[in-house]
Every structure is written in C-alpha cells, then in structure tokens.
Image (cartoon, rainbow, N blue to C red):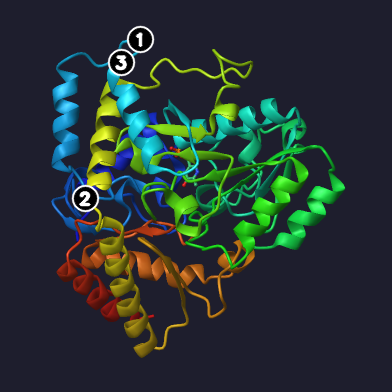
Amino acid sequence: MIYKRSSALFAEAEKVIPGGVNSPVRAFKAVGGTPIFVKSAKGAYLYDEDGNRLIDYINSWGPMILGHAYEPVVEAIIEKAKLGTSFGMPTELETQIAALAVSMVPNIDKIRFVNSGTEACMSAVRLARGFTKRDRIIKFAGCYHGHSDSFLIQAGSGAVTFGTPNSPGVTEGTAKDTLLAKYNDLENVKTLIEANKNEIAAIIVEPVAGNMGCIPPVKGFLEGLRELCTANGILLIFDEVMTGFRLARGGVQELFNIKADIVCFGKVIGGGLPVGAFAARAEIMNFLAPLGPVYQAGTLSGNPLAMAAGLAMLQALDSDRDIFKRLEEKTAYLGAGIERVLRANNVVFTINTIGSMISVHFDANPVTDFKSAAAGDNETFKKFFHGLVAEGVYIAPSAYETWFITDALTYEDLDFTINAIDKISKTF
Ligand SMILES: *Cc1c(COP(=O)(O)O)cnc(C)c1O
C-alpha cells in the first residue's frame, strides 16, 4: 500500500501539533512508520487519504461497536444539529439517555454525563473521596483510567508504550495518594489496605482490563475486591469506560454479578461523540453539587449532539437481544482462526479474549497482569502490525492494546484477517 498523502499530511501536522497527533499512541512511535490519516469510515472499514481500505479492529478504541457511520446514530446527530448544538441549559434528551442507562446497568440510581472517560474517572474518585472523607486510592499497574494526575502511575497502553509511567508534571503530593497494586493479586491489595487503615477512599479497577492487552479477572479477584471494600469502608469503582455496554448490557457488573459502588463509562456510551459518565446509587450520587458538597461541572456536559448519538447507540444495543452473543461468537471465531494459523507457523503466542475484546501477545506464558503483558516480544509485534496494515487490516499500533470487534464485521472479513495473519506470520 502507498501512504504518500498520509506521510505528507503527517509532516504538515507535526509543524503545528505536538508529535502531529492529539493523542500520543496515534503517532506510531511504538511500531515505527507514519500514521495513517483517515478520510472516512463505514461499517467495518476505514478509508485512508491515499485511497486504501483497511478492515478496522480498533473502532475508535471501542465506541463503534455497531460499525462506523451507523445510520441511526448519524441521523440522530444530523436532526439534533439543526435544532442548535449547545445551550448550557437542561434538555429532555439528557433525562432520556440517563433513564435508559440506569435501566440497562444494574445497581445504579443516578448518572451524570461528562465529556470523556478521563473526566468520568477523575470525578468518580473525587466523589469517593468526598463521600468517605479519605484521601488515598488504590489503582492497579497496567490499568488506565484516563490522563488525570492521580492515575498516571503505571497507567497501561499509551503511558506505558512511551516508557513514562510516571509523567513529569504529576506532583509527589498527588502521587503519594495513589497506591499501586498488582492486577489479579488480592493478597497484594490486602497488604496495602492493612498498611493504610482508614485512609483508603476507593479502589479503582478495570474489572476486565483492556489497556495492557485484554486481561480478564482471575476467578475470585473481583469478588475478593468487593469483600475487602465492604469490610473496610472503601468504595469500589469499576472503570467500565471500555467494558460498559460492550461485554454485556449492564457491563461487567452484570457479567460477573458483582456490585460496584461507582461505575465509570465512556466510549460506547457516546456512540462516537465525546461522552463520559459516572453513576452510582442515589446515596452516593446525591453527594454531588448541586445537592451535595462535591463539586463537578461542565460547559458542554450533556451536549445535545453527544446525547443524541449516545441515546441512539444505547437504544440500538438495548433493543437487540442477540448483539453481545453475536459479538462474542465472531470474536471466538477470529481467536480460534488466529490460534490455528500462528500455531501452524510455529509462532510463540498467547491469546486473551472475553466477549468482543481480544488481544494477541507474543509470549508463551499466560498474560494475567502488567508484568506478564510487558514480557511480550515487541519486535514480533512490529512485524505483525506492519504486515497486517500491508494486507489491509488495521489493529492498534501498540502491543498493549485490545482489539475491538464490531458487529459490522462479516465472517468473510474475519477469514480475510485470519488468512492475512497466516501469510505474514510465515515470515516471522
Ligand atoms: C479509554 C479509557 C479511559 C479514558 O477515556 P478518555 O475518553 O480517553 O478520556 C478511561 N478508562 C478506561 C478503562 C479506558 O479504556
């Protein structure tokens, strides 16, 4: 494939945007080469500025679960735009999407909308601190909760790809209130709680991790976190920005039947527009301004275009009772196919998968936490990535990312992808 125009556009972008991108992982630093500039996308396909077509396994990092330019979402945005794009005043639409989200997700009474997953997680932690009157939080190495200060401590994906797990600009004062635990290791969490009695406001966790590849929780891990939180007056925050409305209608809470105290959303909930949200039972949510003392606000929060897109997306997912099963079947088919061809070509690998999330790791050992995810062979990943792009298949340009399966993918697309992997892995 030819990337003449992408290369030229990147050179122009680099002059006026740091690194040429508005979010670091897009710059291809981990894999080398020039980022591909997108012109348009429809269904399962991206069309770049050089006229190449790519089967897309990133889907805007999750939101496009029903495929790109999904008609009902696009229609909803167009119709709303004609009526005005922002008011900074309440609209009926906000109540409609809130009511639908509350009906789909277990164990929440109220939800507040913000503009990104970062904002959702940042606000959830402030709310937890205000509610418990404690300062510290526990997060897990390799889990990503957006780019706010408290979370940039071994933060997975983008942050890890660049080897700056602790970003300059995050003060020591902030960092000392974030305690770092090992994913899937309850004993480690227990030790931290013991050492910080009555000081921990919240444990924030990706209940299925997706920012160090896809790492499902081991049996008993989430149950154990729930028990520890309940026993110690700690709030359990499920960061379901990636998994919410993806792994099940009600997210991981429903999938594993575990109650979180606060749940964060992003990605799918906005249907591809900038939306995040956090939700909890009324007792906790009523702690927020204007009812309670914890301040949180946003000029564009609940923006009508964003809410229209999100509502159309949630309605589509809510009314399609087979969607999550269909996605899981496609993902399992892809996973089995990749496993078959990699094994036939003597490649050392581990595949992790759950629902519509899947990741391929170039290491023989099980990948269960950040350390094992980091053990993968990045040189092989680079060949894998560029080989796939040359065949017309786009995966994330980092070995720490999950692939997101969209309903728009056909079995022909999946076979095409498996054959492409067969072809390129012969050359590893
Ligand atoms: C993407 C992501 C975020 C951050 O969301 P943004 O919208 O990029 O700010 C937070 N948590 C998880 C689990 C994510 O995957």
Q: Residues within 10 Å of mark 3 (few under 14, many from 20)?
A: few
Q: Are marks 2 and 3 in contact (CB under 8 Å)?
A: no
Mark 1: few/some/many CA within 10 Å (<14, 14-19, 20+): few
Q: Using residue 18 as the reference point, say whether residue 186 is left or right of it.
A: right
Is residue 333 among the parts visible in the rendering? yes
Q: Could you tell me the amino acid type at mark 3?
A: Thr
Tell me what residue is drawn at x 30 percent, y 79 percent. 337
Which sits earlier in the primary sequence, circle 2 or circle 3?
2
Residue 382 image offset from top left, x and y in percent = 42, 66
In this picture, residue 142 sits left or right of residue 85: right
Picture coordinates of residue 410 (x, y %)? 17, 64
Please report contact status of discs 1 and 3: CB closer than 8 Å, yes or no. yes
- The answer to whether mark 3 is within 8 Å of ligand 1 is no
Identity, as a three-letter code, of the amino acid under mark 2: Lys
Q: Is residue 345 above or below residue 94?
A: below
Query: At label 1, which amino acid type do we have?
Result: Met
Residue highlighted by disc 2:
4
Direction from residue 132 to residue 403 in the image, left or right: left
Calculate the distance from the C-alpha at mark 1 to the C-alpha at mark 2: 46 Å
Q: Is residue 122 above or below residue 236?
A: above
Q: Which residue is mark 3?
A: 91
The vertical placement of 79 against 183, above or below, is above
Residue 89: give its label. Answer: 1
- The answer to whether residue 426 shows anywhere in this view is no
Disc 3 element: loop
Mark 1 C-beta to ligand 1 under 8 Å: no
- Find the distance from the CA under tag 2 to the CA under tag 3: 46 Å
Q: Considering the image in quadrants, where does the C terminus appear?
A: bottom left
Label 1: element kind: loop
Q: Nearer the viewer, residue 157 or 26?
A: 157
- Nearer to the camera, 11 or 87: 87
